[in-house]
Image (spheres, grey):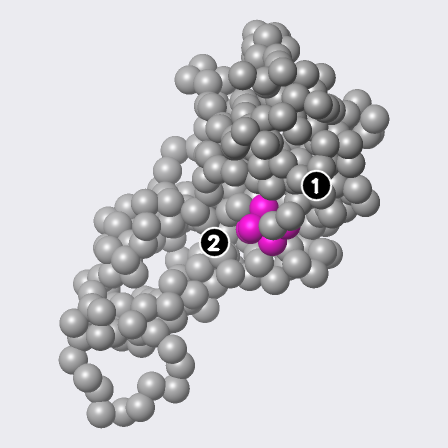
Amino acid sequence: MITPTGELAAFLRTRRERLDPRDLGLPARRQARRTPGLRREEVAELAGVSTDYVVRLEQGRGLRPSADVVAALSRALRLSPAERAYLFNLTGQRPRAATEPATAAVPSLARLVADLSPLPAMLMNHRYDVLSWNGEMAALLLDFGTLPPSRRNAMWVCLRHPEIRESYVDRERVVREGIAHLRTAWAAHPEDPALLGLIAECLRDEDFARLWAERDVEATGRGSKVLRHPAAGVLAVDFEVLLPIQDTDQRVLIGRPADEASRAALRSCVGSPG
């Protein structure tokens, strides 16, 4: 069972262990280091808190750090902006979204996805549930209408669908990026039982479980994926994720061919993308 307290403990520990004391200008210690990274007392000194406090946080003993302490720990551990935001979410220091997680497409966004043709596009919520898609996305990746609603999830499809799981040339990177997104989404929506259920099911996958343990939260909103398409062959698709200002739990993913060869291959299976 994943809990914010347990995740906070593991996240702080992994971020402490990855740091090199020499990079932080800390004095050399006479006693040999038995574990990698900083010692707890070094983190405590850098953050301006007691060593006992850091120990209790890493032991998951139910502490609720203040916003000032979270900011101090973020600086001490040299967290990236994404990791800092994740830590604030874990500790409940960020305001929760006032709206319930989206389970159906906003009609205007569903029309936008359709109007983006001939570019492949789909609409998802924070869980990666696919709420709407156009014909080009169905031809490129999968007609989600052939799946029961409970399986219309991009992460589940990547892990468990017998055809799609083998279509990604760099599957590990795709899974890693998906995990970073799901972990960030969970920190912002720890009360979402469907998201918890999805993560629990995905953890049965050996690759997912291994990468989940790395606690990467550097989610990306753009990039490129290389696919093996049964009709078009190997093609690279650049993608961009757009977040509406009003419906913040929904996001539009748009694909474009990454090069001329992929453009021709994509045209052969979905039309004539620009």
Q: Quadrant of the C terminus?
A: top right
Q: Quadrant of the N terminus?
A: bottom right
Residue 160 in the image, given as x and y percentages of width and height: 76, 46
> According to the image, label 2 marks what residue?
216
Quadrant of residue 47 in the image?
bottom left
**Which residue is rendered at x = 49% and y = 18% of the image?**
247
**Which residue is rendered at x = 38% and y = 77% of the image?**
36
Q: Nearer the viewer, residue 7 or 60?
A: 7
Task: Give the magenta range.
Answer: 171-176
In the rendered structure, which amino acid carries the disc numbered 1?
Answer: Arg
Quadrant of residue 100 in the image?
top right
- Residue 84 lies, with reference to residue 48, above or below; the image says above
Quadrant of residue 137 in the image?
top right
Residue 206 in the image, given as x and y percentages of width and height: 70, 61
Alpha-carbon distance for marks 1 and 2?
26 Å
Side of 97 where 261 appears, left or right: right
Disc number for residue 213: none
Provide the secondary structure element on which disc 1 rests: strand
**Which residue is rendered at x = 57% and y = 56% of the image?**
212
Provide the secondary structure element on which disc 2 rests: loop
Residue 23 in the image, given as x and y percentages of width and height: 22, 69
> According to the image, label 1 marks what residue?
228
Prevailing secondary structure class for the magenta stretch in the rendered image: helix
Residue 45 in the image, given as x and y percentages of width and height: 20, 69
